[in-house]
Image: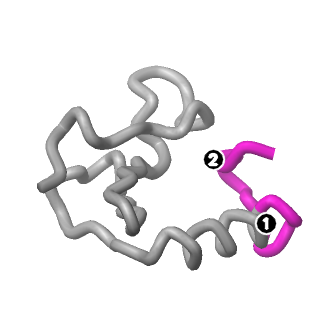
């Protein structure tokens, strides 16, 4: 079960309260993500290998990250 302590916010989550991006939870062998502005709503869960590939593609510059939420 995912508890409040399970979730980590991006260090690029914006100023103020830091609620402008996503939160991530590692629940081996999966990665769950949720909107940090509405944490009680639905989450998305992916196999860790698929999520890692997705993040690597984002870091490579596709698609653009207009809000600056992802580490570069």
Q: Nearer the viewer, residue 6 or 23?
A: 6
Residue at 76% from the left image edge and 65% from the top image edge: 56
Q: Is residue 8 above or below residue 66?
A: above
The percent coordinates of residue 7 (x first, y second) are 32, 42
| Residue 28 quadrant | bottom left
Q: Is residue 41 above or below residue 71?
A: below
Q: Nearer the viewer, residue 29 or 25?
A: 29
Dot 2 lies on which element?
A: loop
The percent coordinates of residue 14 (x first, y second) are 56, 32
Which residue is under mark 1? 64
Residue farthest to the front, as pictured: 29
Residue at 21% from the left image edge and 69% from the top image edge: 42
Question: Around disc 2, counting alpha carbons within 10 Å, would you say few (fewer than 14), some (14 to 19), or many (20 or more)?
Answer: some
The percent coordinates of residue 24 (x first, y second) are 41, 51
Question: Around disc 1, counting alpha carbons within 10 Å, would you say few (fewer than 14), some (14 to 19), or many (20 or more)?
Answer: few
Residue at 25% from the left image edge and 52% from the top image edge: 38
Instruction: Point out the image quarter for the C terminus.
Output: top right
Which residue is under mark 2? 69
Residue farthest to the top, as pictured: 16
Magenta residues, as a range? 59-72
Residue 55 is left or right of residue 10, and the answer is right
């Amino acid at each position: 079960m995912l508890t409040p302590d399970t979730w980590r916010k991006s260090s690029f989550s914006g100023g103020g309260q830091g609620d402008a991006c996503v939160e991530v939870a590692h629940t081996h062998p999966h990665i769950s993500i949720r909107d940090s502005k509405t944490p009680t709503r639905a989450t998305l869960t992916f196999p860790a290998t698929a999520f890692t590939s997705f993040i690597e593609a984002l870091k490579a510059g596709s698609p653009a990250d207009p809000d600056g939420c992802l580490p570069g």
